[in-house]
């Protein structure tokens, strides 16, 4: 790629300069039109304490049990001779595809994994720190369906994909463009990843995720990232964070291992996540689920360090329970919250960044069920100290549908979480003693100097909530939250302006995609 | 009252015997009819840690500032010469109605207030411990309107009042019958309290709250409690917990002081609660609001100990922010959560039981806004370690309306909170190592012994959520959560059976009410 140097310089220029201005202009224009998204916020740097459900005794017990699982039961690495060879070389016991680990081996391998890493965005102002006191919100990932703005539930298209990237780009408290914000089912399955990665680069300047559905698609993602960031930059930094699910219980399969190896080799981050519907894929108890989650993460995350010591890797969990009546997944219930809190503690003890949660729900529509379940999930996600939050916005139907209205409502909740995470201001202004003196008993604070001075920033201002009187709400058409969210999504999409992308990079990307697409026939399964 | 001894014995008998059986039969009947409320749970004994937003430094700062407010600005005790005389005698500085407190006086007076007390119910199985690790859920309090099961928003009636008492009686995770579950606007205002207190006694066997709208209505409440529990029992125990709001900023008025004095004199519990819309009734910051709340509670709660040392008193907060655009109250936003967490810490340091929170929202309908806001409030309420939770269920429109559908949805969430508060089971069964061994890699846990053995109790089972497939949900009529809640409320009300009440007590109560009602003309304002 002879144009790579030029591309890299342009990308750098774009990242420091015009890209940022483009976003700012879009935000200002949207703000002028009313109900605009407002100022972009950087990722959350939590100033609040953590909530921890387990004490030392419980944590030590679960860790010892996970070690037992790894030693005695082991984990299967399927259809991947290289993985088995690497584990054998590292000292593990291999029988068929079953890998059993000497006590302490995975933990010892993980000492090279960074507790915090930077994922670079093409706009440096949008780069994020993943780990430590950082919390990064990324949108919904994976749904084949959308619930659209006309109230239809239908297969998702690339147009929907672009729309969700645009909305996430505009949302002040979404810090990351995510990955498969919906499945663009209208694009052939073997070419889809090209359009998805391109959309993240073209329509947003926030960091994004890579394709994991085949090793060659992961390679394509890395190649496209190199067009944007330059070869050397990509090899020596992290510009992709991608989702590697364990096939629970206790299996990693060929597809996930293939993608993991590509990303780790290029120093790109993997989120090793046991995808758990407790009661089906893990024991029906919280402690049992945490034990299995820890064992699976230890094996999968340590494997990244066999590929490339120092490659960033996250401790992921996706925790749901199943309905013991129907077998259907349930969300926002007490047990997944307990799992998330406990897993976050285990991750911190392991020194790995932690991913869980989001705005999960089982509801088919953006109604009260959706909101209760999402709020319960998001509250535990924040207080657990989660570093990377997938499915932060738009998730409906247990992840089968990306919903525009839900997306907008969740974005509002993310803003609240971000404000909450600032904690209590104990400055002299925060203490407000002069205001108390000025007002005194029996008066009110509405017009006092302190209130006037803090008017704009004092309280979080919801973009969705209607706090007016019943009569005014009635006069304005008795709209529900989802109706207001619908209107807001339309306004945002109308006012969207793409961030600056250097035309040379854009052309290199479209050339790369065209070449790849021409090299293979369409596949739809 | 010459029949008091007999009444007391009967009440005792009823409390230990038939009352409990009556409730059990109603629950079983409802359960058989499908969607019944299930087994009554006792109040929550939290087995989870507390979440605390403030460190020692912040707490000490707010406490010092509150002391300054009490010393330098003071609190007004209005239209109550007795209160001023008592404060003067206790060593406070009185100027007009303004009371300024020597440093440490309120704290010192509060040393006689119990950190935990038992509020007795007429069914001893429903008595609650308020304080410590206990959390007690009580329903919505105060709305003049209802949103009924036909979707109408209208003035509340005594029939609505009885219905909410019945629903709270049946709800497994509502531990307290509450007080003004709605305002029965069809009953004259000066006689309303008699019908309200009677309804709590007649249609429920859970503990309840007393009237605070006039001293004589508080006296009537105590008199009715004595008919149920006996004179001596009431004087030496606590059978009422009642709500005394400060008139913030920094005022207690005649009405509230009058009711407080009645209850404290009879050893009944008062919840001293600054009713705060921050930005109007307190400073526009969290730390400033906490300072004023603490000062007001210190003054009001200490006053109960001037009336009767040892009388139970709670540290209450009702925290909302106002919209800086419209002045309307907002709920479920970050700032009130921070206030609740901080106030809970201040209450613990003061050694008083703590009241806040519930399922608060500003929405006019039981939609996603209502649910997000309520869930945010309830999550902070639980994790703060709140002991008495008012407005746990049914609150809508910033407290202007009691909503049947919202009530049922909130009850479901209360059940989740109660399950969450059990924490993580670390027993051998909870660890589930045998299950992990039995299942092994690549299989599933659906049919394994451990799952079968824990099938019934493993996961919280929602009474409202639809977790089925989209297709099944569609086939069942595409119902929203509020529609399902509507159906559930109707089923519960149909299957309601009153708990046993001794006929002699019932007659004594109705005689008392008739005598009182005949002694005065109807008043409607």
Image (spheres, coloured by chain):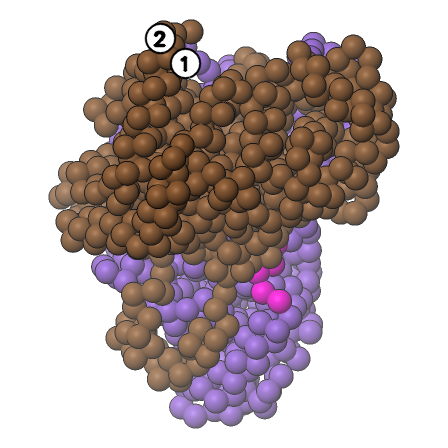
Chain colours: A brown, B purple
Q: Is A34 left or right of A358, judged from the image as shown?
A: left
Quick one: label 1, few (<14), some, or many (20+) residues within 10 Å?
some
Q: Position of residue B328 (x, y in %)?
A: 27, 57
Quick one: label 2, few (<14), some, or many (20+) residues within 10 Å?
some
Residue drawn at x 69%, y 72% as measured from the top left: B112
Tell me, for residue A93, which label it has, or none: none
Q: Which residue is mark 2?
A: A522
Q: Is B473 left or right of B317, judged from the image as shown?
A: left
- Lower sequence index among marks 2 and 1: 1
Q: Is residue B432 above or below residue A201?
A: above
Q: Which residue is mark 1?
A: A190
Q: Quadrant of the N terminus of chain B?
A: bottom right
Q: Is residue A130 above or below residue A398?
A: below
Q: Is residue A442 magenta?
A: no
Residue drawn at x 51%, y 56% as measured from the top left: A45
Callouts 2 and 1 close, C-beta under 8 Å: yes
Q: Quadrant of the C terminus of chain B?
A: bottom left
Q: Is B102 left or right of B332, judged from the image as shown?
A: right
Mark 2–mark 1 Cα distance, whole angstroms, equals: 7 Å
Q: Is A462 left or right of B201, judged from the image as shown?
A: left
Foreground residue, B12 or B292?
B292
The chain that hosts pointer 1 is: A
Magenta-drawn segment: B51-55
Residue A86 visible in rendering: yes
Foreground residue, A437 or A460?
A460
Residue drawn at x 72%, y 39% as measured from the top left: A110
């Amino acid at each position: 790629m002879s144009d790579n140097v030029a591309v890299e310089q342009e990308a750098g220029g774009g990242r420091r300069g015009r890209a940022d201005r483009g976003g700012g202009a879009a935000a200002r224009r949207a703000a002028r039109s009313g109900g605009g998204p407002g100022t972009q916020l950087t990722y959350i740097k939590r100033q609040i304490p953590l909530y921890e459900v387990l004490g030392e005794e419980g944590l030590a017990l679960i860790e010892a049990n996970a070690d037992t699982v790894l030693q005695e039961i082991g984990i299967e690495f399927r259809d991947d001779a290289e993985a088995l060879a690497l584990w054998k070389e590292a000292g593990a016991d291999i029988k068929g595809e079953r890998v059993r680990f000497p006590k302490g081996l995975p933990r010892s391998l993980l000492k090279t994994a960074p507790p915090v890493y930077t994922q670079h965005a093409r706009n440096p102002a949008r780069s994020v720190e993943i780990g430590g006191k950082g919390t990064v919100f990324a949108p919904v990932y994976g749904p084949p369906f959308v619930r659209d703005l006309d109230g239809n539930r239908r297969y998702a298209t690339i147009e929907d994909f672009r729309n969700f990237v645009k909305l996430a780009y505009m949302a002040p408290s979404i810090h990351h463009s995510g990955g498969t914000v919906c499945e663009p089912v209208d694009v052939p399955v073997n070419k889809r990843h090209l359009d998805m990665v391109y959309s993240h680069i073209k329509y947003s300047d926030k960091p994004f995720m890579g394709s994991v559905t085949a090793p060659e698609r992961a390679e394509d993602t890395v190649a496209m990232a190199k067009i944007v960031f330059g070869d050397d930059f990509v090899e020596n930094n992290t510009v992709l964070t991608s989702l590697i699910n364990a096939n629970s219980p206790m299996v990693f399969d060929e597809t996930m291992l293939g993608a993991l190896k590509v990303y780790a080799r290029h120093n790109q981050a993997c989120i090793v996540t046991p995808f758990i519907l407790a009661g089906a894929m893990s024991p029906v108890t919280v402690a049992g689920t945490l034990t299995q989650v820890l064992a699976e993460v230890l094996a999968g995350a340590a494997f990244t360090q066999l590929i490339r010591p120092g490659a960033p890797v996250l401790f992921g969990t996706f925790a749901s329970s199943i309905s013991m009546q129907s077998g259907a997944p349930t969300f926002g219930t007490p047990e997944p919250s307990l799992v998330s809190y406990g897993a976050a503690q285990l991750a911190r003890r392991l020194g790995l960044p932690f991913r869980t949660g989001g705005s999960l729900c089982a509801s088919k529509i953006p109604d009260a069920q959706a909101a209760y379940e999402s709020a319960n999930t998001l509250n535990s996600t924040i207080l657990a100290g989660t570093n990377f939050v997938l499915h932060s916005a738009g998730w409906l139907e247990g992840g089968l549908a990306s919903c525009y209205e839900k997306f907008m409502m969740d974005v509002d909740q993310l803003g609240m979480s971000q404000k909450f995470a600032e904690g209590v201001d104990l400055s002299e202004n925060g203490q407000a003693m002069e205001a108390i003196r000025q007002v005194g008993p029996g008066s009110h604070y509405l017009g006092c100097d302190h209130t006037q001075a803090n008017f704009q920033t004092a309280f979080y201002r919801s973009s969705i909530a209607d706090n007016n009187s019943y009569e005014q709400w009635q006069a304005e058409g008795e709209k529900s939250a989802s109706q207001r969210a619908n209107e807001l999504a339309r306004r945002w999409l109308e006012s969207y302006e793409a961030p600056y992308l250097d035309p040379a990079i854009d052309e290199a990307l479209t050339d790369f995609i065209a070449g790849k697409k021409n090299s293979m026939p369409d596949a739809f399964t």
